[in-house]
Image: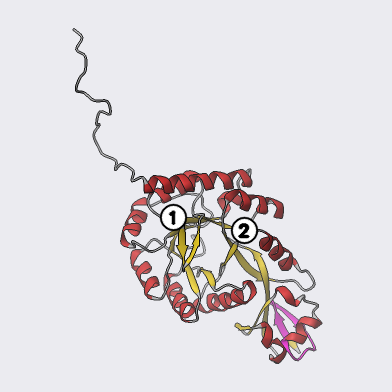
Amino acid sequence: MVEFYGEKVSSRFLLGTAQYPSPKVLADAVRGSGAEILTVSLRRETAGNGAGGKFWELIRELNVRVLPNTAGCHSAKEAVTTAKMARELFGTDWIKLEVIGHHDSLQPDVFALVEAARILTEDGFKVFPYTTEDIIVGEKLLEAGCQVLMPWCAPIGSARGPVNPDALRAYRAHFPGIPLVVDAGLGRPSHAAQVLELGFDAVLLNTAVAKAGNPVVMAEAFARAIEAGRLAYEAQPLEPRDMAVPSTPVIGMAVFE
Amino acid sequence: MKLTINGQEQEVSSETLAALLDELAYDHEFLATARNSDLVAAEDRADCPLAEGDRIEILSPMQGG
């Protein structure tokens, strides 16, 4: 079990809902993933269209908790207003806070992120900040009232996996007891297993499943990798070493001349 | 009067946000609204007056990651 803002969930897999080939594939992938938390967003609605309502019906039928995001926001003000609109629409005070600072890398503007996090937590929001793996920014986010941190491991949608595992290891060590979710940059189940092995509590991803050749099977593959990674972390893996150590006992060897 | 609605300039006759949603034939149930970058909660739309040049955002649930 992992706990976010006092809510216990059994799956360590948080899944996004964008870019699937069809609503049915999305629904099947969610079921295959076992995810209990789905990311959703807000976009401009066309008059008389009702597309938002249809999508919301689909999500509600999946019987999961939703984590609305502020994707696409580039300032604290934009993110705060979007979060308030999301709270009303989705009926939750959970918010995945994104404040994008760089067009190419989609790296967060961490200064605006901390400012928005402070405003939102004071307003009762439970903020899940999409951040970099910078420990000082993490500390500032906790001071701003966040009780979860979500560092990236590579740029959004890049599928590169952990590009700086040493930084992630240091991040985990620096924030014992804080739920940590790697959000963004995962491409393969082995990447998810790696960050779970490092002690991260969960992963949040979207593109790696939605854009896979078979999203439903890939969702299941990630689910198993996440479970395996967590088990490995709990089992306390061996630390690597430079030199060989014989695994078979040397004592008692027969001597042949 | 002329408003900017979801980024598009439009000529409308409604005097409140609630009336505007009716005028434009929006389904109220799955919408969030903002006037000039501030949230207007569903229960406040009927009391939200519109003025020339207002920027209105009308959002609904969408796929996200």
Q: Residue A153 carries which label?
A: 1
The amino acid type, in three-letter code, at marker 2 is Thr
Magenta includes A154? no
Q: What element carries label 1?
A: loop
The mark lying in front, picked from 1 and 2, is 2
**Chain letter of disc 1?**
A
Question: Label 2: few (<14), some or many (≥20) within 10 Å?
Answer: many
- Placement of B22 over or under A215, stated as above or below: below
Q: In the rendered view, does A249 fall on the left or right side of A137?
A: left
The residue under label 2 is: A17
User: x and y percent of residue A249 in the render?
Assistant: 24, 25
The magenta stretch spans which residues?
Answer: B3-17
Residue A41: quadrant of the picture: bottom right
The CA span between labels 1 and 2 is 20 Å
Q: Nearer the viewer, residue B14 or A61?
A: A61
Which quadrant: the N terminus of chain B?
A: bottom right
Q: In the rendered view, does B37 fall on the left or right side of B51?
A: left
- The tag earlier along the polypeptide, 1 or 2, is 2
The amino acid type, in three-letter code, at marker 1 is Cys
Question: Label 1: few (<14), some or many (≥20) within 10 Å?
Answer: many
Q: Nearer the viewer, residue A121 or A249?
A: A249
Q: Nearer the viewer, residue A138 or A255?
A: A255
Q: Nearer the viewer, residue B1 or A7?
A: A7
- Placement of A76 over or under A137, stated as above or below: below
Q: In the rendered view, does A167 fall on the left or right side of A89?
A: left
Which quadrant: the C terminus of chain B?
A: bottom right
Q: Is mark 2 on a helix, strand or loop?
A: loop
**Chain letter of disc 2?**
A
Residue A175: quadrant of the picture: bottom left
